[in-house]
Image (cartoon, rainbow, N blue to C red):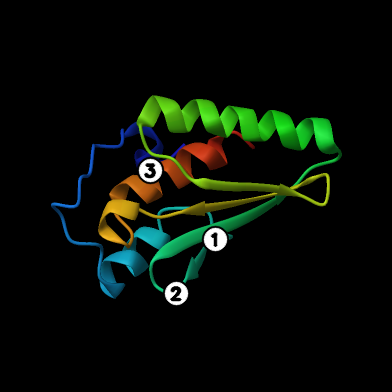
């Protein structure tokens, strides 16, 4: 477990600036290497499970974390056993520390 997974998301109502490219690059080093940067403003990761039940359980666990943190990803369960997670801070149309905190906590579910 890394330091990000021990932090908590803070409410963001658009009063901060999104991370710049340098900050994003630094933060990407703190999360699993399979998180991909999309258009410099979103993080995306794909997960594959053995079956629909496991994929759905994972989605539900992600939902619990998201609710507890007050930061909500886009979640797509597709092809019956695949889950794609997309993270961004919608209020600032970019990435903030919250996205990386949530990414780290989500990855902790697979450990």
Which label number is shown at residue 39? 2
- Residue 106 lies, in percent from the top left, at 53, 39
Distance between mark 1 and mark 3 Cα atoms: 14 Å
Decide which of tag 2 and tag 1 comes sooner along the chain. 1
Looking at the rendered image, the quarter that the C terminus falls into is: top right
Residue 111 visible in the displayed image? no
Mark 2 secondary-structure assignment = loop
Which label number is shown at residue 56? none
Camera-side mark, 2 or 1: 2
Mark 1 secondary-structure assignment = loop
Q: Nearer the viewer, residue 48 or 25?
A: 48
- Residue 67 lies, in percent from the top left, at 43, 27
Residue wearing tag 3: 101
Residue wearing tag 1: 33
Mark 3 secondary-structure assignment = helix
- Neighbour tally class for label 3: few under 14, some 14-19, many 20 plus, Cα within 10 Å: many
Q: Nearer the viewer, residue 34 or 46?
A: 46
Task: Place residue 96 in its image quadrant.
Answer: bottom left
Distance between mark 3 and mark 2 Cα atoms: 20 Å
Camera-side mark, 1 or 3: 3
- Image side of residue 76 versus residue 108, left or right: right
- Residue 46 lies, in percent from the top left, at 66, 55
Decide which of tag 3 and tag 2 comes sooner along the chain. 2
Name the residue at 56% across, 34% down: 62
């Amino acid at each position: 477990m890394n330091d990000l997974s021990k932090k908590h998301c803070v409410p963001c109502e658009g009063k901060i600036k999104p991370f710049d490219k340098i900050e994003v690059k630094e933060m990407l080093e703190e999360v699993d290497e399979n998180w991909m940067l999309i258009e410099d403003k979103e993080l995306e990761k794909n997960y594959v499970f053995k079956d629909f039940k496991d994929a759905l359980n994972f989605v539900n666990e992600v939902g619990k974390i998201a609710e507890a943190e007050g930061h909500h990803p886009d979640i797509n369960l597709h092809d019956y056993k695949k889950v794609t997670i997309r993270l961004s801070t919608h209020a600032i149309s970019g990435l903030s520390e919250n996205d990386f905190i949530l990414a780290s906590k989500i990855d902790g579910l697979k450990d």
